[in-house]
Image: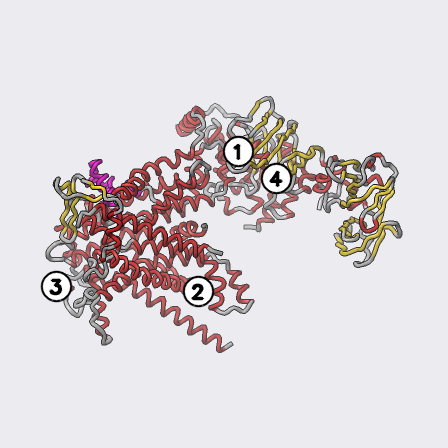
Amino acid sequence: MATSDETDDRVGQAYRRRIRTKIRTATRRSRRAARPVWDRVRFARQDLTAATPALPRVAYLFIAPFFLLFSVFLAFPVFYTLYLSFFEYQGVGQGSLFWIDLGPVYIEIPQIAQLNFVGLGNYARLLGNDLFWQSMFNTSYILVIQVPLMIGLALALALALNASFMRFKGVFRTAIALPVSANLVAYSTVFLLLFNEQLGFLNYVLAGVGLGPVPWLTDGFWARNTIIAAVTWRWTGYNMIILLAGLQTIPQQLYEAAEIDGANRWEKFRYVTLPQLKPVFLFVVVLSTIGTFKLFAEPYVITGGGPTNSTITIVQYIYRQAFVNFNLGYASALTVVFVAVVSVFSVIQIKIGGED
Amino acid sequence: MREQRRKDAVWRFLTYAFVITMVVVMMVPLYWMLVAATLPQEQFLQFPPRLLPGTAFLDNFAALQERLDFVRTIRNSVLIAVVYTLLSLVLCSMAGFAFAKYEFKFKEPIFYAILATLVLPIQLLVIPLFLLMAQLDWTNTFRAIILPWAANPIGIFLMRQNMKSIPDALLESARMDGATEFQIFYRIALPTMRSSLAALAIILFLFQWDLFLYPLVILETADMYTIPVGLAQLTGFQRIYYDQIMVAATLAIVPMVVLFLVLQKQFVSGILAGSLKE
Amino acid sequence: MSGINITELDKVYDSGTEKVVAVEDLSIEINHGEFLVLVGPSGCGKSTTLRCLAGLEDVTTGSIQFGDEDVTDHRASERDVAMVFQNYALYPHMTVRSNIGFGLKLSTKLTGDEIEQQVEDVAEMLGISELLNEKPKALSGGQQQRVALGRAIVREPSVFLMDEPLSNLDAKLRSDMRTELQELQADLDVTTVYVTHDQTEAMAMGDRIAVMDGGVLQQVGPPEEVYRSPVNQFVADFIGSPSINLLSADVEGETLRGPGGFTYEIDDTEPVAGHDRVRVGIRPEDITVVDSGQNTADVTVVEPMGNENFLYMEMDGHELTARVDPAIRPAEETQVSFDFREAALYLFDAKTGDALKTKTDTVDPAVVGTTED
């Protein structure tokens, strides 16, 4: 293809020559030809449109379907949870509406929620409950180690894959991100076996280099680390992909300018990459933090919260209160506190990250 | 100069070593799952563990199929996830379009109220949602699984962010061409949003694919089970058939891998637009 | 076919907390087939006016008539107007063919074949037939510009609206397209309202230009009239490149006394009657460098343009620009004397900026015709 300027010029001249003869030949009234079906459909639709009065509040129509579902299935349950948190759920007297028994999973929902108003009683109760604090500690522990570890790894991988000399980027990227495809329960089961103390692959490898066996699932400290490893395994690649995409939007000139200014590898990272990556980085950090706060299925399947509650997370604790002990009111109060904590955390992160 | 080149070479080596190590770490559990799926239970549960695949995959699969119709389970999961994803894409993009391109009363409060539900752990809505579904007599139905999060806060957030980048002139141009507001949405705005829609499709599909506790509570009969529920059920017998679980896990990974490979590129560009602004 | 009649148009943006007046009490009559350019600095209300004409913005008060029809409350699609946007606003996912045909498809009763035929005719007319199956991304700026034009032309509207359509093109292409646009508009004989911030473009293209500032129409008239007889200091300053030289001077009888020892004797004192202080305006091309005279200035920079030289001078901190013959090239940092004819002098009220006196010299086509940069 010729360069655009040449083309424009040539086209322009041709056009000027032609214009004087061609003017208005474009005007052609509709010939009485047979009109195909799709034209008739089009005309019918146009007539319909013309007949419909302009809707002044069209924006509300666009959000209405979303908002309807949102109100019924998200907003209502949220408010109901808030409401429940001030009541005590009374006994199982009326029989069960529903129960399900799947061995480790036993769920029963009583038919009529007989509620007894207790004010802030549920909130007072949770503050004095050891298991609540234990689960808060476990969640915090996992969070404090897992999120930085995962994001550090994800960032390092993204930087490595973004390096100019790196080859097979696509292959590496896909391979590292593949774990996210694994089903939550499926991969948790795989980890359960991998980390098995007697038969697991991991202890086999460790034994090979003269270590172990490590009580991955039977010791509180190690069990928490097992959970951390599992979550990190699954989500590192996902975050890497987002960070990598963020890296690729940083203009090359910035690096060239830094190089001319004599910046070394670290300084380029510190003064170019980090500031430029900040919005994407913040996005990843906030979503990861929320995600880890909400941890449930991994400890549920891998450790069951054990040994002796050393891996029980806050969500798992709430689940137990709600569906094993049927303390629906108390569980709701826990939920409210939990959501408040997560929200405050997210806002703080966004505030800190969003500065300057 | 020479010194510098040697340093660069070392750096390169370390970078490759790191990446390859991570690839191996990521692959081991998947590989091991595959191996386990191809071995009879007895061989699998011996020490030292077997490292090479066996030939018992089909036998394991047959055994699995006999105990729980896992093909049907996968089909249920795919069906639910696909319908959910499509429905949610429509709702989120319509609402996102309105939030990005129209001015209306209470726009900001409504948007932030929706966004605030992002922090809600879905497991915790299970209590009121179950009571609600029981009232509606919707337990053990797919619609009870599909509808609640079709109004997805992440979805509306991403779509709003991306739709904001559509130039107003494009929409006005269509308005001058005689397009109605709804035509502007589906003939102009939606087609320019392809990569964002793909990104959102992955996120939504993954979200639904991972739902565990909620379907566990809602779905009562084996013919309705989704993959996570089915898998959990496999662990629920007195004797745990790891070989069958591994077959199921292996099969369960396939649809997600396919979706991911197909939409990977768009996923990247689409999700990026969401994080770049604000 | 129709002219346009804008009557007492007001446009106020009300965000609830504060009101912003974008256009105030605007009345213009635009003749059928006329090429009117709305020009002014950014935020002057020219684009808002255009958008009101297009039907993209609601009018707060006032009315808009196309021909005999009041279209104030009509939807954009019912006004029989076509608009070319600054960034062309081509639909990125559609081919050039679909882009041009989109409007016909949505709002006419032409059959698919007829639409196809018209699209091809227009494409041939604009010389973009080969591009019909391309997507906008594959086109150069000039080609995109043509597609945008084609999209407007194909609908055979009674009014063309153009919002800075040339501002994204490089300089050479821009001046080529200017000519083309004018020819096209003249040939199609469609009333056109064209918005630009570039006074050169306005002067070059408009049958008449309408200068706006702060939401208020300052002056409408043929380019030459606006240039030679601006109604106020703002119009004088905005139109013309390089800008008019402006300085404040005290009136002492027949003498104007300005900064840096600037003095000028005027023969006709009538315009300054009753004024102690006025603003004096001199177009750069009216300044002549003389061997000796009562006014002097220090030359700071000389820009040789080839066919003429721009002298940038300073008079006690006041900048002064002159356009002179290329032969005149004083060294920088030297002092020169300058003079000008009274007929070329502009005088403005020091407080209101209203014109007291404008050019009275005879038109020298060689001067007026070279205002392009």
Q: Are marks 2 and 3 on the same chain?
A: no
Chain part drawn in magenta? B124-149
Residue B125: percent from left, percent from top: 26, 45
Q: Give the residue pinned by disc 2.
A: A163
Chain of the residue under label 1:
C
The image shows residue B200 at horizontal and vertical percentages of: 36, 47
Q: Look at mark 3 in the image and give the residue it sits on.
A: B42
Residue at image coords 55%, 43%: C87
Disc 3: host chain = B
Q: Nearer the viewer, residue C202 or B228?
A: B228
Q: How many marks?
A: 4
Mark 4 crowd level (few <14, some 14–19, many ≥20, 10 Å Cα): some
Give the spatial CA distance, label 4 vs label 3: 82 Å
Q: Earlier in the sequence, mark 2 or mark 4?
A: 4
Numbered tag placed on residue A15 in the rendering: 4
How far is mark 2 from mark 4, CA to CA?
Answer: 49 Å
Numbered tag placed on residue C56 in the rendering: 1
Three-letter residue code for mark 1 = Leu
Specify the amino acid type for callout 3.
Glu
In the image, residue B134 lies in the stretch drawn in magenta: yes
Mark 3 neighbour class, 10 Å CA radius: few under 14, some 14 to 19, many 20 or more: few
Closer to us: A337 or C254:
A337
